[in-house]
Amino acid sequence: MRGLALNLLLAVVWALFSGEVSSRELVVGFLVGFLIVLLFPRALGAERYLERSRGLAGFVVFFLRELTVANVQVALLSLRRDPQLNPMIVAVPLRLQSELGLTLLAAAITLMPGTVAMGLSHDRRTLYAHAVGLPTAQAARDSIVEVEEELLRFLQPGSRSFRQGEVLT
């Protein structure tokens, strides 16, 4: 039994032993189970689960920070008398390949004000997005690549993240 399944089992066991199977007890049991898995990852075979959990937590923190910054930037743009919107459509080469990864990337950049995912190329290697409020097309691509890198840390733990053009040694 690995990671998440073990954690869910521990949550249910906790709720049963507490004598009350409720949402509150299941959440407490999940947190207690996560602490147990965190303390004994190698013995329980849950190293990958913990890596993915760290990646997910990192992505959530990153996304909330970027969402807040983007909202402030768009609000400031809307308050200007003559805003420099600089609308553009950019093509961004992708490293994500899974349906889940592509869906999360498109949803994440679309939720951030100022960017909208328009679609994927036929081979699913390029994302087309509309962006406003950024000075250059490269800045728009870089912001999308940054979101993709955070997603890669969550979806493919242990893989080395690299920027496009960087040579792997």
Image (cartoon, helix red, strand yellow):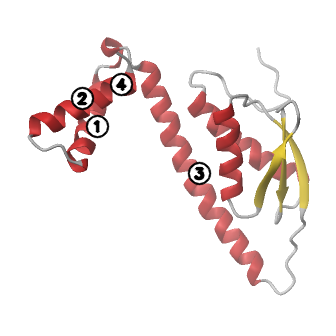
Disc 1 on helix, strand or loop?
helix
Q: Given the image, on which type of amino acid does mark 1 rest?
A: Phe
Crowd rating for badge 2 (residues with CA inside 10 Å; few <14, some 14–19, many 20+): many
Q: How many numbered tags mark residues here? A: 4
Disc 4 on helix, strand or loop?
helix
Mark positioned earlier in the residue sequence (3 or 1): 1
**Is 92 placed above or below 130 here?**
above
Q: Which mark is residue 30?
A: 1
List the residue tagged with mark 3: 63
136 left or right of 13? right
Q: Given the image, on which type of amino acid does mark 2 rest?
A: Leu
Q: What is the x, y in percent for residue 42? A: 35, 14
Mark positioned earlier in the residue sequence (3 or 2): 2
Q: Given the image, on which type of amino acid does mark 4 rest?
A: Ala
The quadrant holding residue 28 is top left
Q: Which mark is residue 5?
A: 4
Q: Nearer the viewer, mark 1 or mark 4?
A: 4
Q: What separation in Å lies between label 1 and label 2 (alpha carbons)?
A: 7 Å
Q: What separation in Å lies between label 4 and label 2 (alpha carbons)?
A: 9 Å
Q: Nearer the viewer, mark 3 or mark 1?
A: 1
